[in-house]
Image: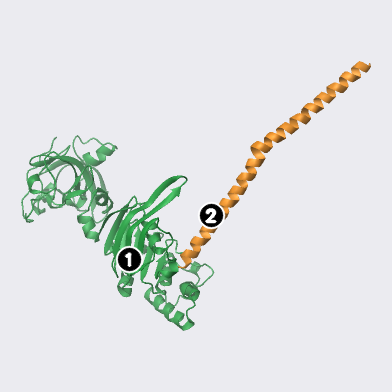
Amino acid sequence: MSSHLATLYWSGMLVLFFFWAYGIGSFILDLKNKIIPGIIQYRRGRRKAKEQREREEEREEREQQLY
Amino acid sequence: MARVRLEHVTKRYDDQGDVVTAVDDMNLDIAHGEFICFVGPSGCGKSTTMETIAGLTIPTEGQVFIGDRDVTNLPPKDRGIAMVFQNIALFPHMDVYDNISFGLRLRDYPQDEIDRRVERAADIVQLEGMLERMPEEMSGGQRQRVAIARAIVREPDVFLMDEPLANLDAKLKVHMRTELQRLHKELDTTIIYVTHDQEEAMTLSDRIAVLDSGSLQQIDPPLTCYNEPDNLFVAGFIGSPSMNFVEGTVTEDALETPNFSLQFDPSSIEGISVGDSVTLGIRPEDIYPADLRDEVADPSGIIQARTDILEPMGDEIFAYLLLGDGETSMSQEMATNDQLLMSIDPDSDIEEEDEVGVVIDRRNVHLFDSASGEAIVHDLRPVGTDSSASGSEVETDD
């Protein structure tokens, strides 16, 4: 009876450990492949949009000097 | 004096690692009071050249002079110029008066001076009584006139106009063209005008600057560009419909093309010799039905052709003629060598699929070097021949 309980206990622990380890591994991969590149892309896009906006404002200001 | 000079102006852009040359070693000298048009296909560098003069773009190399001043690195406001843009760019929340006076208010002009200049500009562009209107209440042509008035009040040394009529309908465009000509006469100032519409350039300007791939191809009065184009590009670009081009080879007494030969004396024309490969250029209006041969100043012999398509335009008909075996094809070779476009009288009885004989006025035949594209001659008659010379024999190869 006690050997059955031990087997059940260790089997349960193994399943829980597998999903715990899988979760950590999956999160690390997501961080590397999705989350960090996403943040970099977002910040780059914001920077580009800001530069573009500044260029357009400068251009508009120069054009207005010709009105 | 608002003379404008460009000396070796080059503009290069960095396009994601690739260097793009928008303007390549441009040299221009525009006299005071001249109306000059920059014309060329999209991407030829005409707007970039104008922006360089305006100060919206700083050239990579070279210098820009307005009057005697080197303005290459000056901001637009210090150049003594005003510009009319293609998109009109009126402030929608300001009425006409405020739009016109915007530049003067920005420069802190006294109110009575502003009133005087706005009134005069409104009078010139015929906007009297509309000064309190909002832009949304005006037509496209009226809005464009407000933009022009906004430029006039500045009393600039040079007007720059970047395709100002591009967004107007055809009828309004023609009307505004005459308005611009009147304006130029009235103001007696230098106008630099950018357009891709060669008809606009021909009718408006004192000289046309034809640009291609950032390079100046020719700068001359409109009729010189039309009658004596410097190269194949100018010949093909100026004139609507475009000039016919046929490849040929010079022989001892004729020009041989795949479908006909045109007799002339190569020794009497400088710059060509027997065996040269040349491109023959003929404008549609210099090809005539054979029955009008006696009315042509220096007709060639008769060339046999078949009419393919007729395009009635009202005051004339464009007839597409097939030479040689007369088979229709869409290939480029076909378009250049086996087809001629002829302009004929609207009362002509020529119909599609007719066999017709045509003659070419040799006074207006252009020869270009096939390799370089440079013009060799614009008249096939021997030097010194008068216009009453008779035509020579032409044989068809069919």
Q: Height in image: B138 above or below B297? A: below
Q: Are marks 2 and 1 in contact (CB under 8 Å)?
A: no
Tell whether B151 sits left or right of B312: right
Q: Height in image: A38 above or below B56? A: above
Tell whether B358 sits left or right of B73: left
Q: Which residue is mark 1?
A: B4
Q: Residue B154 falls in which quadrant of the image?
A: bottom left
Chain identifier for the orange-coloured part of the image: A
Tell whether B251 sits left or right of B27: left
Does mark 1 fall on the same chain as mark 2?
no
Residue B281: x %, y % from top left? 20, 47
Q: Chain of mark 1?
A: B
Q: Residue B115 falls in which quadrant of the image?
A: bottom left
Residue B136: x %, y % from top left? 50, 67
Chain identifier for the green-coloured part of the image: B
Query: Distance from label 2 to label 1 (Cα)?
Result: 32 Å
Q: Which residue is mark 2?
A: A52
Mark 2 lies on a secondary structure that is: helix
The residue furthest bottom is B112
Mark 1 lies on a secondary structure that is: strand
Q: Nearer the viewer, residue A22 or B89?
A: A22
Q: Amino acid at mark 2?
A: Gln
Q: How has the structure been colored for display?
A: by chain
Q: Nearer the viewer, residue B31 or B178?
A: B31
